[in-house]
Image (tube, grey):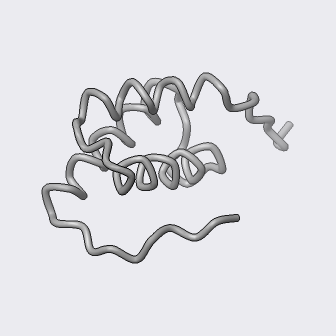
Amino acid sequence: MRSTQCIALSQPDIDTLQRVFDNICAEHHWPRDSEHARRHARMLIDEYLAGTTNEQLLLVVGRWFASRLPAETSTSS
């Protein structure tokens, strides 16, 4: 697993990432502490640090990434 760069994000940066993350989790009915949500959070931060800072573009990239994830399996009966 690669490490995310240690760069301080401003509060507006964090707010943008949080809105996108919350939106994608809600669209896919993912609990915020699920494996898919954690992978998604990492991808969004990496994408943001790579220069995609527009919220609408992050949503597009986030939706694409979510569509590529395998279905999450439930271990409860």
Q: Residue at x 39, y 42 (%)?
A: 21
Expressed as whole percent of the image width and height from the top left, the position of residue 6 reads 40, 77
Q: Is residue 17 above or below residue 3?
A: above
> Is 43 on the left-hand or right-hand side of 50?
right
Q: Residue at x 25, y 44 (%)?
A: 53
Res 5 quadrant in image: bottom left
Q: In the rendered picture of this protein, how many numbered marks are placed on residues? A: 0
Q: Please say if 60 is above or below 39.
A: above
Compare residues 12 and 2 and report the one nearer the observer.
Answer: 2
Q: Position of residue 20 (x, y in %)?
A: 33, 38
Q: Residue furthest front?
A: 51
Residue 1 in percent (x, y) is at 70, 64
Q: Where 76 falls versus 1 (above or below)? A: above
- The C terminus: image quadrant: top right
* Residue 50 on image: x %, y %: 39, 52
Write the residue at 24% across / 58% down: 14
Q: Is residue 36 rendered to the left or right of residue 75?
A: left
18 lies left or right of 67: left
Q: Which residue is found at the position 22% from the left and 36% from the top?
A: 54
Residue found at the far left of this picture: 12
